[in-house]
Each structure stands twice: as structure tokens, then as C-alpha cells.
Image (spheres, grey):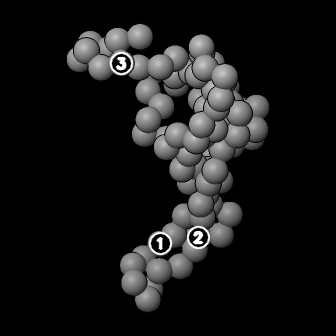
Amino acid sequence: MIDEDGEKQWEVEALLDHQCVPLTDGTGTDRRVIPNKFKITSYFVKYKGYDEASWQPVDNLVNCDELLETYKRSKGLHAPKYT
């Protein structure tokens, strides 16, 4: 698929897994982990027409908001615990 800027985009078939890190507050030596708060950093993505899935950063996943919401709902990954 080609987007409006002429860039090639791949169509997401499925989100298979996710990785997350604890959220932190502060900087330097004042930095602390916020209990029970996580940020999803990447998803294990299966693209249509490809046999292998790959880890992709969240920012690479565009034009698949509905699929992301369905995945999050199925895994219980909603606020306030996950961002």
C-alpha cells in the first residue's frame, strides 16, 4: 500500500504480543518508578502477505487504531495502568 506521501506502508494482519516498560517520574537521581503504571513500547506484528512477524515500535503502527484498540481490550491493557 502507498500512502499520500508516496511512502510504502504494510498492512497489519494481527498484533500477536506486546512489550512494556514501567513509567518513571523525575530525572537523574530523583527518578523513580511509578507503581502499577506501564508504557507499551512495541508490538509483535504480523503483516499481511508475510510469513514472519516482527517487533515494531509503537510509532511505526499507523492507520490501525481499531486493531490496536481491539488488541488492548482483549488483553486488558487500558488506562489507568497502561499508556
3 and 1 marks in contact (CB < 8 Å): no
Name the spot of residue 46 as percent of width and height, x first: 63, 26
Tell me the SS state at disc 2.
strand
- Give the CA distance from mark 1 to mark 2: 7 Å
Tell me the SS state at disc 3.
loop
Relative to 41, say whether 46 is above or below. Answer: above
Relative to 47, say whether 81 is above or below. Answer: below
- In the rendered structure, find residue 63 and report the number of the disc placed on it: none
- Give the CA distance from mark 2 to mark 3: 38 Å
Q: Residue at x 47, y 80 (%)?
A: 31
Give left or right: position of 65 versus 38: left
Tell me the SS state at disc 1.
strand
Looking at the image, tell me whether mark 1 or mark 2 is earlier in sequence order: 1
Name the spot of residue 32 as percent of width and height, x first: 53, 79
- In the rendered structure, find residue 8 and report the number of the disc placed on it: 3
Name the spot of residue 82 as percent of width and height, x first: 62, 50
Residue extending furthest toward the front: 51
Looking at the image, tell me whether mark 2 or mark 3 is earlier in sequence order: 3
User: Can residue 36 be spotted in the picture?
Assistant: yes
1 and 2 marks in contact (CB < 8 Å): yes
Instruction: Give the residue at mark 1.
Output: 25
Q: Residue 13 falls in which quadrant of the image?
A: top right
